[in-house]
Amino acid sequence: MRYAMIMAGGAGTRLWPMSRKGQPKQLLRFIKREGDKKPRALLELADARLDKLIDQKNRYICTAEQYRGSVRDLLPDYDDEHVLGEPAARDTVNAVGFAAAILAKEDKDAIFAVLTADHVIEPIDAFQERMDLGFRLVENDPGRFVTFSIKPTYAATGFGYVERGTPVRDAKEGKKPGVDGVKEHAYHVARFVEKPDKARAEVYVASGDFAWNSGMFVWKAQTFLEALAKFEPESYEGLMTIQKAWGTKKFRSVLAEVYPNLPKISVDYAVLEPAAKEALHAQRTGKKGTQFQVCTVQMDVQWLDVGSWPSFGETVPADKQGNRSAGEGSVVIHGCRNSLGVAAKGHTLALLGLDDVIVVQTADATLVMPRGKSEELKQLHGLLGEELR
């Protein structure tokens, strides 16, 4: 059966002062799309993309335990069992493994999508068509790990890249409206590349063989656990202890004891990269011995990672000078170019003669910075008093 897990545990420090420890970016109602009467949270958008794709009873959210109440307030259709609360942040391999352990215990044939709560993805029907293709690939071969890649629109240095290998051939491929078939959209992964410098990113984009790594996946829960046992056994052992306690009175105490001690590592480093290397070696040498295949499905969608104020600005219409305004207050801009103003409720924010500047106002803090300094906001965040973080 098909399931989905949305990862929603990020802190969003590059969206300070709006994003705080008690109200991180994925829970902020600050994204307004065409047709919306009021702004919605990134997590709301991620959940809405699953409509008509995954039954509500088969959807899970993995987040920090401290956000459980806020998540359920935002999305009341999720009960406590469908909100997986992490007692500590242990990176993505353990968030994914946590979900895989629970799903494999509930349904030995569970196949699940791993989705993110950081992105605006449009159009939704194109996203759902490619996601359906990913599910079909795994349903036809449970040894497959499917990652979704995004056709790059510029030489980004802030994203990882996926290099496409040979096309996937699938005798059982289906035909659905809007999906031409496996071979046109699904490829074996040749390699993963971490965030490149500008020169390499330009070469990658020009080649046409590389795409952005979206951080979204589909795989069989049990297969993922088998790979975890092989490539990251310490995490596997801990998660099996947690799985055994699931559904018992001891679950909360076991989770609190075991989970914070799991090795902190990303799912790409821990599972996908070694599995892809092993599969490629087997293909080149003709030797058997790997039960995993790593594939990528390219999504031709508008994909925006809302992880900083410049990227948030791209969700807001611009005037003729490239200026953008948002927030619940009033923003007045004159004689500026390519600037962003975000005003707090009940306030007026005025920008005069400022180019390439971002000004964000909240009830208790105001941020003023050049657009080009957005990545340094993490360092500034570390200098703030705890009450402002």
Image (cartoon, grey):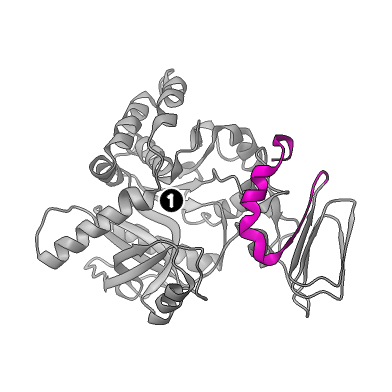
When the figure is inspected, residue 8 is found, relative to residue 329, above or below; the finding is above
Residue 109 shows in the view: yes
What residue appears at the point 33 percent right and 73 percent down from the top-left corner?
A: 181
Can you say whether 102 is above or below 347 in the image?
above
The residue carrying mark 1 is: 114
What residue is rendered at 35% in x and 33% in y? 239
In the rendered image, the vertical position of residue 387 relative to residue 35, given as above or below: above
Under circle 1, the secondary element is strand
Measured as percent of width and height from the top left, residue 62 is found at: 49, 41
User: How busy is the neighbourhood of tag 1: few (under 14 within 10 Å), some, or many (20 plus)?
Assistant: many
Q: Amino acid at mark 1?
A: Val
Q: Which residues are magenta?
A: 363-389
Q: Let me know if residue 137 is in the magenta part.
A: no
Q: What is the x, y in percent for residue 263?
A: 37, 37
Image coords of residue 236 (percent x, y) = 30, 36
On the picture, is 33 further left or further right than 243?
right
